[in-house]
Image (cartoon, rainbow, N blue to C red):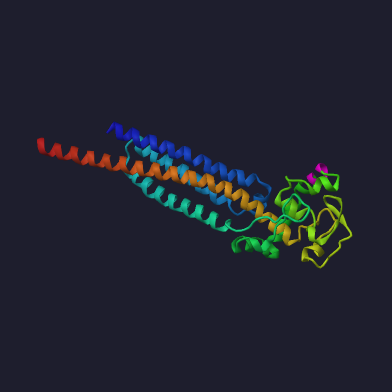
């Protein structure tokens, strides 16, 4: 019996530790400027991580102090959480399966198109009500000002590899418009204003820039895709580990109940 209690306590302690990367992934998303503006994924991840922590703690207490009803609660609740975590993993993969950057002529950075991304993600940024809030949040960051500090010469900017999707989509006009570089956030004399609707949306007003452009929305989704994919990897690893821990816990619980029944049977036979 002591061995079973120790096993249940140990595996639930491992489950407690497994909640930390889930909570950490959600907190990391919340600190990223784009995710903090959109507020889509971080709270589901954080809430799920906290629930795993609470249920694992309940299982640890139930296993260590041999409280059967608490162990049963743990087994049922953890199964539900594992299913929810698996659904979240699949959902993130599905909504981030589409979309990639396009390399414009004579440029080292990528540009992005809104129609390349999944319909679910596009709906999060297409309505003017949602986008006005996101745009206001994005324009308050320093991401475009950082480009002006990093690049003063046109060719250096055109050869830059470290421009983020958000900076590419929101801080400059699309390359096909043919604007002339003055600095990364100030462009003049477009050659073809009709090449893309975003060409007309561009403004040298430092609070406007291309925040009203579809390229900015696409850059945001490209950033979200990159960050969500990283989180998905963490969640997949955690999911596999949780499943293993859960199966071991089920076996330990079953063996413990079998020992109890066998002990009661022997006591009934020999007394």
Residue in the foreground of this view, choosing between 184 and 70: 184
**Chief secondary structure of the magenta span?**
helix
- Report the residue at 31% width, 40% height from top: 252
Say whether residue 271 is visible. no
Q: Is residue 29 above or below residue 190?
A: above
- In the picture, measured across the screen, residue 159 lies left or right of residue 73, that is right
Can residue 37 be found in the magenta stretch? no
- In the picture, measured across the screen, residue 195 lies left or right of residue 21, that is right
Bounds of the magenta segment? 146-150
- Report the residue at 42% width, 52% height from top: 80
- Residue 85 percent location from the top left of the image: 47, 51
Image quadrant containing the N terminus:
top left
- Report the residue at 69% width, 58% height from top: 218
Q: Is residue 19 above or below residue 181?
A: above
Residue reaching furthest to the front: 106
Q: Quadrant of residue 243?
A: top left
Residue in the foreground of this view, choosing between 175 and 52: 175
Residue reaching furthest to the bottom: 194
Residue in the foreground of this view, choosing between 236 and 130: 236
Say whether residue 266 is visible. yes
- Residue 259 percent location from the top left of the image: 23, 38
- In the picture, measured across the screen, residue 158 lies left or right of residue 67, that is right
Q: Quadrant of residue 219?
A: bottom right
Q: How many tags in the picture? A: 0
- Residue 268 percent location from the top left of the image: 13, 39
- Residue 220 percent location from the top left of the image: 68, 54
Image quadrant containing the C terminus:
top left
């Amino acid at each position: 019996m002591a061995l079973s209690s120790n096993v249940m306590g140990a595996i639930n302690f491992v489950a407690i530790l497994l909640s930390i990367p889930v909570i950490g992934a959600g907190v990391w998303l919340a600190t990223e400027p784009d995710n903090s503006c959109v507020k889509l994924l971080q709270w589901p991840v954080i809430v799920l991580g906290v629930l795993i922590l609470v249920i694992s703690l309940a299982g640890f207490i139930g296993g260590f102090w041999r409280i059967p009803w608490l162990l049963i609660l743990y087994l049922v609740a953890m199964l539900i959480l594992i299913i929810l975590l698996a659904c979240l993993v699949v959902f993130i993969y599905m909504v981030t399966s589409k979309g990639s950057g396009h390399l414009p002529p004579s440029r080292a950075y990528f540009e992005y198109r809104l129609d390349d991304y999944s319909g679910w993600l596009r709906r999060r940024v297409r309505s003017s009500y949602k986008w006005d809030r996101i745009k206001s949040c994005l324009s308050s960051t320093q991401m475009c000002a950082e480009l002006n500090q990093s690049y003063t010469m046109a060719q250096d900017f055109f050869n830059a590899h470290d421009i983020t999707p958000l900076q590419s989509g929101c801080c400059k006009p699309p390359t096909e418009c043919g604007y002339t570089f003055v600095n990364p956030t100030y462009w003049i004399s477009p050659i073809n204003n009709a090449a893309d609707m975003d060409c007309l949306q561009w403004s040298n007003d430092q609070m406007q820039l291309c925040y009203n452009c579809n390229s900015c929305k696409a850059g945001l989704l490209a950033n979200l895709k990159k960050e969500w994919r990283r989180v998905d990897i963490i969640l997949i690893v955690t999911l596999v580990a949780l499943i293993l821990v859960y199966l071991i816990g089920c076996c330990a619980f079953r063996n413990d109940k079998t020992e109890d029944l066998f002990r009661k049977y022997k006591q009934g036979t020999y007394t």
